[in-house]
Image (cartoon, rainbow, N blue to C red):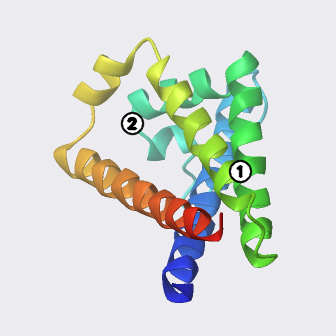
């Protein structure tokens, strides 16, 4: 069981990094929208040159208002769930569940969801299916462990 918990922790850690990078990129997108100087890579390209317009629109949506607060809260819950896993706390599943729930809630309430999905490639959609299957698997492992402790 400890190997499965370790794998679930690895999945959560990778997702936390992925989520944090998304927050970082969204911060740059909103900074560009406010007219600030863009972050330029060594090729002279900005984030607008690297991402499709549908992804940029979604980042703008995710990072504004209450959705931005929820996204940051989900990120903090992911970090806290990693800490709870390290401390072998029973609260890891709750924190991770809150993070996944908030992430899903933000996507479900996105009003341009159909347009976004239409503008993604089949490979991107397959990656998302794989990603959320693995994330759900990590949640089920934590739930199974929680039920055995209780």
Q: Position of residue 127 (x, y in %)?
A: 30, 55
Q: Are marks 2 and 1 in contact (CB under 8 Å)?
A: no
Horizontal relation, residue 69 to residue 71: left or right:
right
Cα separation between marks 2 and 1: 32 Å
**Residue at 65%, 41% in the rendered image:** 98
**Residue at 52%, 37% in the rendered image:** 48
Give above or below for 77 relative to 101. Answer: below
Q: Which residue is mark 1?
A: 95
**Residue at 68%, 44% in the rendered image:** 23
Horizontal relation, residue 28 to residue 128: left or right:
right
Q: Nearer the viewer, residue 37 or 64?
A: 64
Q: Position of residue 139 (x, y in %)?
A: 50, 57
Q: Residues within 10 Å of mark 2 (few under 14, many from 20)?
A: few
Q: Nearer the viewer, residue 2 or 8?
A: 2
Give above or below for 138 relative to 22. Answer: below
Q: Residue furthest bottom?
A: 3
Q: Quadrant of residue 65?
A: top right
Give above or below for 99 relative to 54. Answer: below
Q: Quadrant of residue 79?
A: bottom right
Position of the C terminus by quadrant: bottom right
Q: Residues within 10 Å of mark 1 (few under 14, many from 20)?
A: many
Mark 2 vs 1, N-terminal side: 2
Q: Which residue is mark 2?
A: 52
**Residue at 62%, 68% in the rendered image:** 13
Q: Secondary structure at mark 1?
A: helix
The mark closer to the camera, 2 or 1, is 1
Q: Position of residue 26 (x, y in %)?
A: 65, 37
Q: Secondary structure at mark 2?
A: loop
Is any atom of residue 40 visible in this view? Answer: no
């Amino acid at each position: 069981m400890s190997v499965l918990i370790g794998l679930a922790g690895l999945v959560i850690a990778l997702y936390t990094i992925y989520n944090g990078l998304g927050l970082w990129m969204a911060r740059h997108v909103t900074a560009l929208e406010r007219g600030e100087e863009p972050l330029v890579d060594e090729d002279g390209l900005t984030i607008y040159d690297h991402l499709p317009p549908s992804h940029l629109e979604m980042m703008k949506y995710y990072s504004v208002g209450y959705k931005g607060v929820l996204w940051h809260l989900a990120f903090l819950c992911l970090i806290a769930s990693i800490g709870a896993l390290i401390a072998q706390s029973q609260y890891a599943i709750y924190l991770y569940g809150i993070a996944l729930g908030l992430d899903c809630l933000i996507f479900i309430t996105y009003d341009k969801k159909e347009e976004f999905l239409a503008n993604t490639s089949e490979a991107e959609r397959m990656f998302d299916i794989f990603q959320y299957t693995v994330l759900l698997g990590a949640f089920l492992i934590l739930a199974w462990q929680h039920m055995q402790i209780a």
